[in-house]
C-alpha cells in the first residue's frame, strides 16, 4: 500500500514537472515566433467580429466568399476613408513638426536656466567623483573610458518609422487571414468538431466552447468599440471647447491609444499635454484639458467600460490586469490589446475541462463562478 502511494506521488511530481516544462516551452515559442502568432490572433479576432455580418449576408442568399469579400472591402474602405478625411490635419501636423521641435528646444533651454547646471549634470558629476574615489581606493588610476555614443534623434525616428511599418504589415497580414477565415465559413469549425472528440458528448462540449468563445470575443470587441468611440467624441468636444487645434485628429489619436488597457490613457495624456503646451501659453488651459480628459477617461473608460466588460466576460479584474501585463511583456503593444480577450478564451475552455477547473476559478469573477464541466455536459445532453 505504501509503495503504491509512493508511486502515485512520484507520478504526480513527474506530471507536474512535464506540465511546467510544457508551459515554459509554450511561452518561449509564443515570444520567439510573435511575428507569426500576432497576425494570426488578430485575424481570428477580426473574423469573430465580422462573422455576424457575413452570416447576415449569406441569409440573403449572397455566396459566402462574395459576402466575405464585400465585408472586407467595406472595412478597408472605412479605414481608408477615415484616413483620407483626416489627411489635411495630419499633413499640417507633420508640417508643423520643425516648429514644434524648435519650441520644445526653447522650453528646455528656459528650464535649464540660461546655461546653469541642471540637476542631471550634478548627478553625472557626482558619479564621476565616486568613480575616481573607487579607483584610488583600489590603487588604480585608469583613464576614464569613453562613453558609448547615444543614438541620435534621427536614428530614433528611423526606428519608430520601421516599427510603424511593421505594425501596418502585421495588420495587413491579419486582414488577409481574416478574409480567408470568413470565406471558409463553417468548414474550419466543422474540422474542430471532428478533432474535438469521438463521442457525441465530447463534440457537444466542443460546440459549447466554440459558441461561448464567439460570444466572448464579439462582446469584448463591441464594448471596446462602443466605449472608445464614445470617448473619442467626448475628447473631440473637450478639445473644441478649449480651442485646441486639430481637435478631430487628436481626439482620434487619444481614442485609439485608449484602446490599450491601462497604459493607453497615460500615453494619450502625454501626447495631448505636449500639444497643449506648444499651443497655449496659459498653464490653466493645459491643466484644464488634462483634467477634463482624465475625468472623461475615468467615467467612460474605467467605470463604464470595466462594468460592461465585467458583465460581458465575467472575468476577475485582477486576472485581467495581470494578463494585460503578461501579454504586454510577451508581445509588446499587440499583447496589451490582445491579452484580455485571450484570457477570456482560456477561461471559457478551462471552465469546460474538469482538470482545468482551478484555472477557471482563478480567472472568473466571484459573482460568476466557472460552469462545472458536469453541468455543461448535462446541458449539452438536454439540447
Image (tube, rainbow, N blue to C red):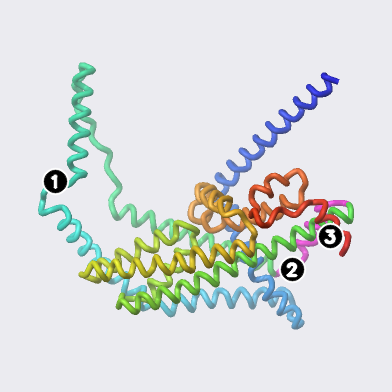
Q: Is residue 41 above or below residue 254?
A: above
Q: Main secondary structure of the magenta part?
A: helix
Mark number, residue 379: 3
Q: Is residue 262 left or right of residue 90?
A: right
Question: What is the quadrant of residue 286 in the picture?
Answer: bottom left
**Of circles 1 and 3, which is in front?**
3
**Of circles 2 and 1, which is in front?**
1
Q: Position of residue 224 (x, y in %)?
A: 55, 67
Q: Is residue 22 left or right of residue 282?
A: right
Looking at marks 1 and 3 on the same chain, the residue that comes earlier in the sequence is marked by: 1
Q: Quadrant of the C terminus?
A: bottom right
Task: Write down the residue under mark 1.
Answer: 117
Q: Is residue 293 left or right of residue 66?
A: left
Q: Which residues are magenta?
A: 183-198
Q: Residue at x 31, y 75 (%)?
A: 244
What separation in Å lies between label 2 and label 3 (alpha carbons)?
26 Å
Disc 2, SS? loop
Q: Quadrant of the N terminus?
A: top right
Question: What is the quadrant of residue 307 in the picture?
Answer: bottom right
Q: Position of residue 43 (x, y in %)?
A: 61, 62
Q: Is residue 143 above or below residue 117?
A: above
For this rendering, which residue is in front, 231 or 37?
A: 231
Disc 1, SS? loop
For this rendering, which residue is in front, 366 or 359?
A: 366
What separation in Å lies between label 1 and label 3 (alpha carbons)?
73 Å
Amino acid at each position: 500500500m505504501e509503495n503504491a502511494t509512493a508511486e502515485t506521488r512520484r507520478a504526480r511530481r513527474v506530471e507536474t514537472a512535464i506540465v511546467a516544462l510544457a508551459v515554459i516551452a509554450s511561452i518561449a515559442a509564443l515570444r520567439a515566433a510573435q511575428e507569426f502568432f500576432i497576425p494570426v490572433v488578430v485575424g481570428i479576432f477580426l473574423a469573430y467580429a465580422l462573422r455576424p455580418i457575413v452570416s447576415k449576408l449569406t441569409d440573403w442568399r449572397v455566396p459566402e466568399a462574395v459576402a466575405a469579400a464585400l465585408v472586407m472591402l467595406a472595412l478597408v474602405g472605412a479605414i481608408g476613408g477615415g484616413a483620407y478625411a483626416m489627411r489635411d490635419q495630419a499633413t499640417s501636423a507633420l508640417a508643423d513638426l520643425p516648429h514644434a521641435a524648435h519650441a520644445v528646444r526653447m522650453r528646455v533651454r528656459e528650464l535649464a536656466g540660461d546655461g546653469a547646471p541642471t540637476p542631471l549634470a550634478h548627478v553625472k558629476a557626482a558619479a564621476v567623483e565616486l568613480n575616481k574615489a573607487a579607483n584610488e581606493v583600489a590603487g588604480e588610476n585608469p583613464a576614464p573610458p569613453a562613453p558609448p555614443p547615444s543614438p541620435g534623434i534621427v536614428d530614433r525616428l528611423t526606428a519608430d518609422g520601421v516599427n510603424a511599418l511593421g505594425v501596418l504589415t502585421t495588420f495587413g497580414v491579419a486582414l488577409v487571414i481574416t478574409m480567408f477565415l470568413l470565406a471558409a465559413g463553417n468548414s474550419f469549425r466543422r474540422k474542430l468538431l471532428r478533432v474535438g472528440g469521438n463521442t457525441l458528448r465530447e463534440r457537444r462540449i466542443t460546440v459549447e466552447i466554440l459558441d461561448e468563445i464567439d460570444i466572448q470575443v464579439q462582446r469584448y470587441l463591441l464594448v471596446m468599440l462602443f466605449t472608445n468611440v464614445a470617448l473619442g467624441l467626448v475628447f473631440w468636444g473637450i478639445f473644441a471647447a478649449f480651442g485646441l487645434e486639430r481637435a478631430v485628429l487628436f481626439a482620434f489619436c487619444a481614442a485609439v491609444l485608449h484602446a490599450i488597457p491601462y497604459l493607453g490613457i497615460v500615453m494619450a495624456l502625454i501626447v495631448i499635454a505636449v500639444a497643449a503646451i506648444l499651443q497655449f501659453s496659459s498653464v490653466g488651459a493645459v491643466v484644464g484639458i488634462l483634467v477634463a480628459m482624465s475625468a472623461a477617461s475615468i467615467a467612460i473608460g474605467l467605470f463604464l467600460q470595466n462594468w460592461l466588460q465585467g458583465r460581458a466576460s465575467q472575468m476577475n479584474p485582477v486576472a485581467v490586469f495581470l494578463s494585460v501585463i503578461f501579454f504586454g511583456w510577451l508581445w509588446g503593444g499587440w499583447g496589451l490589446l490582445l491579452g484580455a480577450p485571450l484570457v477570456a478564451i482560456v477561461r471559457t475552455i478551462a471552465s469546460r475541462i474538469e482538470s482545468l477547473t482551478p484555472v477557471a476559478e482563478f480567472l472568473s469573477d466571484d459573482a460568476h463562478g466557472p460552469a462545472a464541466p458536469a453541468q455543461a455536459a448535462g446541458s449539452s445532453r438536454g439540447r
